[in-house]
Image (tube, coloured by chain):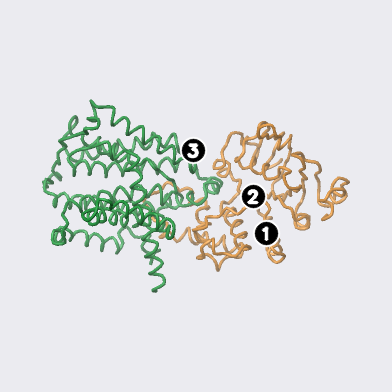
Amino acid sequence: MALIEAQGVHVRFGDRVVLEEIDLAVTEGELHGIMGPNGAGKTTFFNVLTGRVKPSRGRIRLDGEDLAGLGPHEIANKGVARSFQIMTLFDEFTARENVMVALPAFRARGFDLRRAVAGDAGLAEEADQVLASVGLAEKSAVVAKQLPYGERRALEIAVALAQRPRVLCLDEPTSGLGSDGKQRLLELIRSIRTRLTIIAIEHEMDFLFSLADRISVIHWGQVVARGTPRELQANEWVRRSNLGRFA
Amino acid sequence: MAQADAARLVTPAMLGLWLALGSVPLWIDRVGLYPYLGVEILIWSIYALAFNLVLGTAGLVSFGHGAYFGVGAYAFGLAQFNLSANLWVCLGVAVLAAGLAGLLVGLFISHRRGIYYAFMTIAFGQIFWTVAIKAYGITGGEDGLLKIARPPADFGVASFDLHDNVALYYFVLVVFAIVVVALWRLVHSPYGQVLAAIRQSETRAAHLGYPVWRYKLTVFALSAAVSGLAGALFAMAQRSAFPDVMGVNQSGLIVMMTLVGGGLVSFWGPVIGVLVYIVARDVIGALTFAWMLYFGLLFMAIVLFRPEGIAGMAKSLLARWR
């Protein structure tokens, strides 16, 4: 049974149809890649999965539970975390504070006005463990906006991981990274994929083909091809399109 | 040091400030000023700190906050005339009325962002101002609510008369100290941290599982309630309540004071801004009627060259010095 499932998802903005009858089923522990050209509707699909955009019709189910009508915070609370293509960190916070605020234990105290955050060693320790898991152990006290680009990308993922999600949606995680940064990210995703279900939008085909169990190709708002990396490499449409070059 | 202070309920800076403020009635006459000025500075400082909860902590721009200051002032007077002459009852009614007004407005505006949010606050502020002007039978219209008394601060075992401005000054100083401690803790609590996260990215905060609108709603209501407390103290100090404090002009003043002082970067910024504004009004105002022109120029210079305000400048200088 699929852990997260989209059925007949249709999104239109005014007259423009952005997503048309998208179906997707991702099983627990799978790393599912999504690729497609710019403007294909990939990020819109992520926005639907995470509650930022309401579909015109269709359903999203998490472990069989219908997520229709839920907002981003409700879907996040059910265990769906995401990263953003355009990095969305809390720039004035340190790396530790960015992660700390994402921890479920912190969220549970969100309306606590009586205790000071600074005195809570338990939260700081938990945040530091998450930072260590993405290679940022030494950077916990650095303000996010002062981190180099690659480390900001890693922090973006650390924030999503701190939510202890069941499903992690990564929106173009390699965007803006150099080859070293991509290699480090590849290793990071390999290290976390064993304990998570991941859906990753990615333009870097080599990156995606080396990681994904299955890949869906979205074009003009529709899934035009789907399969394992090997199947997609043999797919006529993918081979003929620009996407095939990389495969 | 900053981290240690954040964990404290009362910091060394607070103690130093309270001590300094406690000495004000001892020397203020000798420098050509007067104790009532101190009362005004403290009341506006409470108001500015409350306002900065919305602006500096949560990043929400309100140009209509005078409404809640005014609601507190009127509620204090009306409670005194119609309910009870007891100081605590009147203050409680003022805080409750302003908090409820903030909650009501917050329900309408908390789903909005940026310029739409700011304009909605102006619109609601104007509604409250218009009601204050038009509801003559309740508020006294443009004439205001007059003959508001200064009830004694009755603690059961002892009662303090507040008719004298020095006595009132010390009473307001105690309220100021309580507000400072409460807001300091709030700003450094998980709730305050989530508000700071919302200020930086509403989108990210929502995707981390925080119901952003609920935080925006509650902080607006809390800020309105404390602004109402300041308004009640103002009505008590002035022995009257007038609609002008609810107007756009006065609402803009609190924004100016907070920004000039450096509310965006420092907890103490709003207090600095109030101090600079009120002292400038009295000192420069004694020399020229055009004193507001000079304060306006200062505001423009700060916005253009030092948007972090006086507190931000002081922080930079201190960092360089260290």
Question: The N terminus of chain A is located in which quarter?
Answer: top right
Specify the label residue B111 is tagged with.
Answer: 3
Give the image location of residue B246, x and y in percent: 31, 38
Could you say whether the residue bearing mark 2 is in a helix, strand or loop? strand
Residue B213 seen in the current view: yes
Discs 3/2, front? 3
Residue at numbered disc 2:
A168
Discs 2/1, front? 1
Measured Cα–Cα span from mark 3 to mark 2: 27 Å
Chain of the residue on which disc 2 is drawn: A
Q: Residue at x 42, y 40 (%)?
A: B217
Q: Is residue A200 depicted above or below A96 in this figure? A: above
Report if the CB atoms under discs 1 and 3 are less than 8 Å apart: no
**Which chain wears orange?**
A
- In this rendering, do the residues under marks 2 and 1 share a single chain? yes
Measured Cα–Cα span from mark 1 to mark 3: 33 Å
Chain of the residue on which disc 1 is drawn: A
Q: Colour of chain B?
A: green
- Lateral position of residue B131 relative to residue B137, left or right: right
- Lateral position of residue A31 relative to residue A132, left or right: right
Give the image location of residue B48, x and y in percent: 32, 49
**Label 3, residues with CA under 10 Å away: few <14, some 14-19, many ≥20:** some
Could you say whether the residue bearing mark 3 is in a helix, strand or loop? loop
Q: Tell me which amino acid carries mark 3.
A: His
Q: Tell me which amino acid carries mark 2.
A: Leu
Give the image location of residue B125, x and y in percent: 36, 36
Measured Cα–Cα span from mark 2 to mark 1: 20 Å
Specify the label residue A176 is tagged with.
Answer: 1
